[in-house]
Image (spheres, helix red, strand yellow):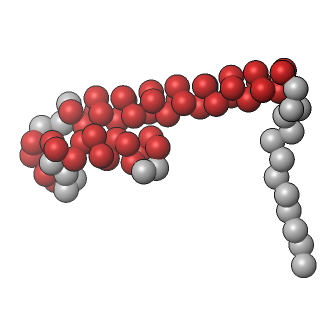
Amino acid sequence: MAHTTINRGFDAGLFGRIAAFAADFRESRQRYRAYRQTVRELEALSDRELHDLGLGRASIDEVAMDAAYGK
């Protein structure tokens, strides 16, 4: 039986914590940009186009959150 372990490889020291913080910050910014772009693109659609996609204006935020954050 095979077993795989994934380690981030960061040292527990100060440099490792700073590097982990920077990586998490970059990922958060990328996800937020994806969220905002999705909201902008969906808000630009007409009500008819949204209806064709099975969406309403009230669900734009939820769809964008799911696209960016998987929630």
Q: Check the image and report above or below for 37 versus 4.
A: above
- Nearest the camera: 18 or 38? 18
Q: Residue at x 46, y 43 (%)?
A: 69
Residue drawn at (82%, 52%) of the image:
6
Q: Quadrant of residue 65?
A: top left
- Relative to 1, is 13 above or below? above
Q: Which of the image's four quarters has the N terminus?
A: bottom right
Residue 53 in percent (x, y) is at 22, 53
- Which residue shows up at 44% across the image and 27% down it? 33
- When asked about the image quadrant of residue 16, the answer is top right
* Residue situated in front as seen by the camera: 18 or 27: 18
Q: Is residue 50 visible?
A: no
Q: Is residue 70 visible?
A: yes
66 on left or right of 19: left
Q: Residue furthest front?
A: 13
Q: Where does the image place residue 22, in percent across and percent down from the top left?
A: 68, 23
Tell which residue pokes out farthest to the bottom in this image. Answer: 1
Using the image, determine if residue 28 lies above or below residue 67: above
Relative to 27, residue 62 above or below: below
Residue 56 percent coordinates (x, y): 15, 48
Residue at x 20% of width, y 31% of height: 44
The quadrant in which residue 39 appears is top left
Left or right placement of residue 23 versus residue 10 in this view: left
Q: How many marks?
A: 0
